Image (tube, rainbow, N blue to C red):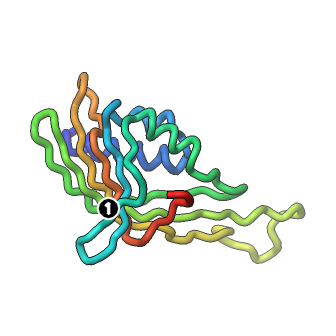
Amino acid sequence: MSDERKVQEILARHVRATDRRDGKTQGALFTDDAVVQSFCKTGADAYEPVAPPLIGGAAVGYAVDNYMTAHPQGGSSHHVTADHIIEVDGEHAHMNAQFVVLRIQATARPAGGWPGGAFGAQGSVQPIESGYYDTDLRRIDGEGRIVGHRILLDMPYVIPGV
């Protein structure tokens, strides 16, 4: 597998852990001193911080496990990433990728089964976030780990109490 593909796979594991609300798996992708910061767009190429940065994989894992809301019954989220720009220089790499987050809500199956004429997916899919992941990585003991992760959101993002 190419170095570029290995870098892209780290982001794939990251977004899947986010969708599953799996802080342990997501936190393990980061170094102990990684800096994770979310920003929201305030102009054409201007961003402002949404909240103080998280420092280290343990903080990332804790945030996923304790601050992300659980999915409702029949609900989930699905991150889609695209247009990965990846640069690898020895033990260091940088990746910038677009993302869209979809909210999935399945319709509960009626107790008596689906009515006659029902067909196809039952539920809704709604885009709820978009932006860019701007990520720095380093190879440590043969494994790629995230050392810096900037989430550049296209819209304002509100965190109560922050």
Residue 88 left/right relative to 124? left
Work out which residue is located at the far right of the displayed protein and give it.
112
Q: Position of residue 40 (x, y in %)?
A: 37, 66
Examine the rendered structure and indicate whether residue 84 appears above or below residue 2. Answer: below
Q: Residue at x 25, y 44 (%)?
A: 5
| Residue nearer the viewer, 19 or 109 | 19
Residue 87 left/right relative to 107? left
Mark 1: few/some/many CA within 10 Å (<14, 14-19, 20+)? many
As helix, strand or loop, the secondary structure at mark 1 comes to: strand
Location of residue 152 by image quarter: bottom left
Q: Residue at x 29, y 76 (%)?
A: 43
Q: Position of residue 61 (x, y in %)?
A: 48, 38
Examine the rendered structure and indicate whether residue 161 appears above or below residue 33. Answer: below
Q: Residue at x 20, y 48 (%)?
A: 94
Residue 62 left/right relative to 99? right
Examine the rendered structure and indicate whether residue 17 appears above or below residue 96. Answer: above
| Residue nearer the viewer, 6 or 158 | 158
Q: Position of residue 81 (x, y in %)?
A: 36, 58
| Location of the N terminus (image quadrant) | top left
Q: Position of residue 111 (x, y in %)?
A: 88, 61
User: What's the residue type where badge 1 is placed?
Assistant: Tyr
Work out which residue is located at the far left of the displayed protein and give it.
89
Label count reads: 1
Location of residue 10 by image quarter: top left
Work out which residue is located at the far front of the displayed protein and give it.
161
Q: Residue at x 76, y 77 (%)?
A: 117
Residue bearing the label numbered 1: 132
